[in-house]
Image: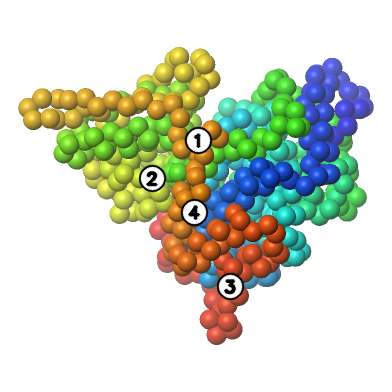
Amino acid sequence: MSIESKPPGPDHRRWDGHLAALRDTVALHAGRTASAEASRQARRLLADTVGCAIAGRHAAEVRRLEAVLADAEPGAFRLPDGPPIGVLGAAQVLSMAATWDEACEGHALAHGRPGVPLVAALLPLAAQRGATLGRFIDAFVLGYEVGARAGAWLRIRPGMHVDANWPALGVAAGVARLLGLPAAGITQAIDIAACQLATSLYLPVASGRTARNTYLSHSALLGLQSAFASAAGIDAPPDALAHYASDHAAAAPEALPPAESTLLLDAYLKPFAAVRHVHYGAVAAREIRRRLPDGTQSIRAIVLTVYREAIVYCGNRAPRTPIQAQFSLSFGIAAMLRFGDIDPSVYEPQCFDDAELRRLESLVVLRVDEDLSAQGRRGAALEVAHVAGVDIAYLRQSVDTIAGDAFHPLDRAALCAKFGRYAARSVAADRASRWCDTVLDVVDIDMRLLWAQLVPAPSRESAPSPAVDASSAHPRP
């Protein structure tokens, strides 16, 4: 990531400070053990991401992909009740499954999720290599710090989706650290990935197609490939990121946080299975639901006033597919009013097609809060009109902070409860609880032993077949 480009070019040289910040971040974290605070947060993200992946893996499409990849690349890694699969296949499945219900982590400054593809790439690789949890955490922290800064800098252009873009840079850095490469080799892995960042479209979300869920798999694979290539001595232009920023990104000119700032501490964990923009209105809807005297059938009008970015990305109305619903402010409000939660179950047909939910969704009017938008702040105000006797009454609720924010994080009980709920279809409650405790509390452990606590090796008699019944799929139009 040298700033000595040949020729530098005046436009590319304006990114010297950004490149220096990334280079300093790599150098700092390549040579030290993660701090106690960073380690604690990395453990939380590991537990949450695995829980989201176990839940999302029950989608028929994910199970079929897992079977195909396991057949193509058998290996030593297993998901609960799954076939043995190799590192590359496992990284794809974990990435896709973790994002399937849109309940996974994110980072506001990065406008994306640096951690999901990192966990997906590092977990099976660390288990295969017999790395310890401590080594996993050191690699994760370095990768996250690179990824979060890359996201803050390399903002995407309109019409693009972030997941198959800059997250690969953090994966490349984290995997290179796990492989034991020095700072120069980690930087080289980032440069290799920078030469081939994808232009991933928002279009699948708008049209309700699940191709978007392959994007983080792409980032995980690109990061793995780039780190392996760097380890093999393959090199890349040291100014690749400057070229990308100038010619292909909507790059932000603001200086990046210095290397000493731990951006991982600002990561958020979601209490709900929906895009973060949906959560502000959803929290307001939950409070109003508690105050409704006669249930949702009395509701006659709903108005959500929210910052502009939320409407830009989550203005989908009458969603036909779960992925559209995950990016729908109106669906999220309706689901919270109707069911009192937004978890993976709301995307199952019995909830997704519920007539009362659909009536509520049709009532929602979206308005822009110009003041919040101008200040770059997040928040929402919800107003619900309902019948009260012979009159129309109004319930109002404003929200400017939500659970999971860096300054309002999910506490341990909420984190472990979420893991238990999300893993319940595959993992017994007592095993899920013990695994969370181990991840959060044990000083160090071989990653193979850690994973075996959650996914014991099957007996020969009970080993599952990799075949998946295609009739279990229920594709939506």
Look at 44% across and 15% down and name the residue there.
370
Residue 150 x, y percent position in the rendering: 70, 33
In the figure, residue 6 lies in which quadrant?
top right
Look at 90% across and 50% down and name the residue there.
233
Amino acid type at mark 3:
Pro
Specify which label sits upstream in the sequence, 2 or 3. Answer: 2
Callout 3: few (<14), some (14-19), or many (20+) C-alpha neighbours within 10 Å? Answer: some
Look at 23% across and 43% down and name the residue there.
356
Residue topped by disc 4 = 416
Label 4's element? Answer: helix
Tell me how many marks there are: 4
Amino acid type at mark 2:
Ile
Residue topped by disc 3 = 456
Specify which label sits upstream in the sequence, 2 or 1. Answer: 2
In the figure, residue 245 lies in which quadrant?
top right
Residue closer to the observer: 477 or 75: 75
User: How far is mark 3 from mark 4, CA to CA?
Assistant: 20 Å
Amino acid type at mark 4:
Cys
Residue topped by disc 2 = 342
Residue 414 in view, yes or no? yes
Label 1's element? Answer: loop
Callout 1: few (<14), some (14-19), or many (20+) C-alpha neighbours within 10 Å? Answer: few
Against 108, is 40 above or below? Answer: below
Residue 465 x, y percent position in the rendering: 55, 76
User: How far is mark 2 from mark 1, CA to CA?
Assistant: 19 Å
